[in-house]
Image (cartoon, rainbow, N blue to C red):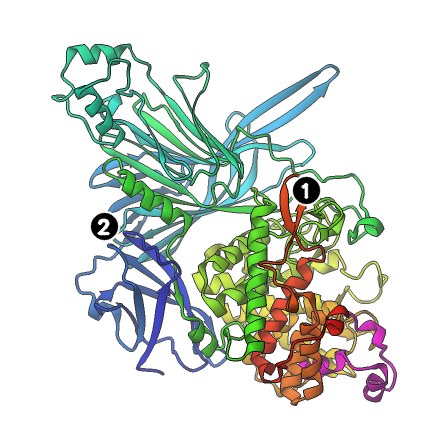
Amino acid sequence: MMNSTEVKLHWLSEDHPPSAGVTWGIPWKEGQLSREDALSLIAGASKAAVPLQSWPAAYWPDGSVKWTGHAAAFLTEPPQDCTLMVGKRDAEQSASFSPLTVRETNDDIVIDTGAILLQISKTGNSIISSMTRNGVTLCTGSELIAIKETVNEQTGSTIIREERYQSRISEVKVEQEGPVRAVVKLTGSHRAVDVDESWLPFSLRMYAYAGLESIRIVHTFVYDGNAEHDFVKGLGISFRIPMQGRLYNRHVRFAGDSGFLSESPKTLHSRRTKGKYLELFKRQLDGETLTDEEMDDDYFKGILDDSARWDQFKVSQLSADHYKMAKRTQAGCSWVKAAEGRRARGVAYVGGSGGGLVLGMRDFWQKHPSGMEAQDMTEDEAQLTAWFWSPDAGAMDMRHYDTETHVESSYEGAEEFRATAYGVGNTNELMIWCRDAAPSSQELEAYARYNESPPQLMCEPAYLRSQGAFGIWSLPDRTTPAKANVEDKLDGIIAFYQREVEQRRWYGFWDYGDFMHSYDPARHVWNYDLGGCAWQNTELVPNMWLWLMFIRTGREDIFRMAEAMTRHTSEVDVYHLGEYAMLGSRHNVVHWGCGCKEARIAMAGLHRYYYYLTGDERIGDMMDDEKDADYATVHLDPMRAYFPKDEHPTHIRVGPDWAAFSSNWMTRWERHEDKFYRDKLMTGIQCIKQANFGLISGPTYGYDPETGILSSMGDDNWGRHLALCMGAPQVWFELSALLKDPQWDEMMADFGVFYNLSQEEKDQITGGVIRTERFEHPLLTLALAAYGAWYRKDKRTADLVWSTLLTHHFAYTDLQHDAAAVTYVREMQEFEWMNTNEASQWSLNAIISLELIGDALPETEPSAGQAAKC
């Protein structure tokens, strides 16, 4: 369709690695890119061709491509920028390119990147059967490890039992097989070593790129135990590494805060290490291989024979502020502390004379308690283990914080006690680099930087907006003082939460990525112990706020915030199996604690940003899993406390329930061209059109997931603000671009204008059947109000939107400089009125209002009296 289009790409970080494999996404306007169009990638100033692999990620209704996914491999330091071109085939530009190959048999899969050979078995317990580089085997097997702890408390004694489990593969699937990138997905569970028992299902993907010596692993597990007695003591993945050469030519490296622990099972350090021996020791610390000729000294060899043989090494990060490195000679002997520090960087190396593996764990200290361990360093085969949950810590406690629920006192959502961790998950990422020799300190530093900020290509914000990606939003605009003030406040809210994550230590395996809900100024702490006021769990869609802030600015620090929140909320806050599968848990002290299990927490609309921008397959799985979330409401009616069982299978609100379903169906439709879900979406829209007042009616309907039919239950049967503050406008704006249905657009506009009308004005439209008391919290509804003002050219509504935004604390508070100094357990800074609901909604609504009604933004700041109204 288009034979000459260029898309400029930039790196998320200015710190470029020496080599990298990268995957990213690009949006396209309807009709701009056909399935047959050729695509190619060229490097910045040199215009050199870069090998490219491309695939469609979503489609427009006319069959043209809406999103593409791309993979490229940079064998040397990547260029400053790249350009994707339409109309010229990559193969024509890359005659010298050696493609990655994948060979599949009945027993295994072999990936040859040209730099390493990776063998994956289809059965058994080994995740990786072998890895070789230049004919040298660097890994002879890899398996997942789980340790279950059971506690038996008897009179006067406590008996603790630990059982070891290892991975058992049930299915292996090649998802991509080159020429640039290969993706293999493994699924299975952890099976007990000594008894016939399994638990903790997992999925794991391995990514390999042509010409590169690295493998990326994305690992997800789901908790399916009984929280009362099934405690996870340890969870990780181990790699067996052949140990060649003398003990003094074997090396262990652990990254600390800024440097590295450099050790060997046979260190050359002794009280006699002086002169030439000291020089040899320094070379050993640098990872050099010492020859037999250099070490042919009977006196010094005698000293070494007398020195200790260190067989095991580990680093344990048990909190966000402390790690410990230690080593020991053998099991049964004490661990000797080697170092302590604050935040280890999650990189290790283990190898011998023939080479070894570098291992990087993403978010190592942020997702404590984590660890890395090297064992059997004096044997023919060592083990390097990455501990997602370190066994040096206490076992995971998946129980609830109480045995009853607290609705009235603590804002917990339902009287029923449904606090269960059964079915929640967690995802972690690893990088493995195959080495033919121990890395230098400079190389280890490069690996550590890569681990902290993996390379990522992105489209420019202006391009994303020009293509209509992710609906309606604005680019930063400081052309007037008033607009500059709003931009400053948007940046200030981000800076506040970045500071708060660090100040309040919102870290940990089950917590990292989430924010807290609301604040307690009396104690100077967030409401960590107050029911529904503790963890946010996607309430009022902070995911969408962070993603819109990223795509409009392109800032890496915001991307990392949004990425962490997406990883958390898509796994921890969502049920992946069991009674509540496809639903998520509302905000609570414990992430899975609230009795309200709702579809909105798990909806695809929250996570599609990350999927389309990065091509992340795990999020793709999760969005596919949500396509039939409406069926889960038959078992657990979201309105069960207010509407008794009747002729309808269940009851739902047009928002957030049907809005969540519509995000799932829209995503399924555009990703897979699945007309069943398109038709289900259209059925619901037709039902809403038939309501007396469109989207204004209801908002609760009888619902049948088999047909998708919404059955009217009256025009005014519940409050409206939840219909608009849980992501519905953002989903529906995107849906509008697919539907091209003027009546749907009009219904959205009418709802937005109607919301803030007086009772008298509402009566003129509805004949008095809808009460204004049902339309609360105007701040939370301003995205659709701004849309209505824009669509209807309604100045009064536009003025109301800006008045509501500009008289809120966020509009006139300098969050970066005006915090009050307080003392909690240490000195801190606070804003006593802060809450994440309004931070998220103010930001989202300001971003959208700047785009739709930016010209209506008044230049005069609100008076003190106006501001006091908030």
> Where is residue 362 shown, x and y percent of the image?
45, 45
Residue 604 drawn at (x, y percent): 58, 63
Residue 714 drawn at (x, y percent)? 84, 76
The span picked out in magenta is 747-776
Number of residues whose C-alpha sits closer than 10 Å to that of mark 1, classed few (under 14), some (14–19) or many (20 or more): few
Relative height, residue 52 to residue 439 (above, below): below
- Circle 2 Cα neighbour tier, 10 Å, few/some/many (<14 / 14–19 / ≥20): some
Labels 1 and 2: the sequence-earlier one: 2
In the rendered view, tell whether residue 517 sits above or below residue 706. Answer: above
Q: Find residue 260 and report its image quarter.
A: top left
- Residue topped by disc 2: 114
Q: Which corner quadrant holds the N terminus?
A: bottom left
Relative to residue 293, is residue 808 depicted above or below? Answer: below
Residue 340 on the magenta span:
no
Q: Would residue 746 be found to the left or right of residue 332 on screen?
A: right
Q: Residue at x 44, y 71 (%)?
A: 461
Occupied quadrant, residue 834? bottom right
Q: Nearer the viewer, mark 1 or mark 2?
A: 1
Q: Which of 656/546 is in front?
A: 546
Q: Which image quadrant: the C terminus?
A: bottom right
Residue 723: where, in percent of width, then height?
72, 70
Q: Is residue 773 magenta?
A: yes
Query: Could you say which disc has been placed on residue 824 in the image?
Result: 1
The three-letter amino acid code for the residue at tag 2 is Gly
Q: What is the magenta segment's predominant secondary structure?
A: helix
Residue type of the residue flagged with mark 1 = Tyr
- Residue 814 appearing in the image: yes
Q: What residue do we see at 67% from left, 73% from top?
A: 806
At 60% from the left and 22% from the top, the residue drawn is 161
- Secondary element at tag 2: loop
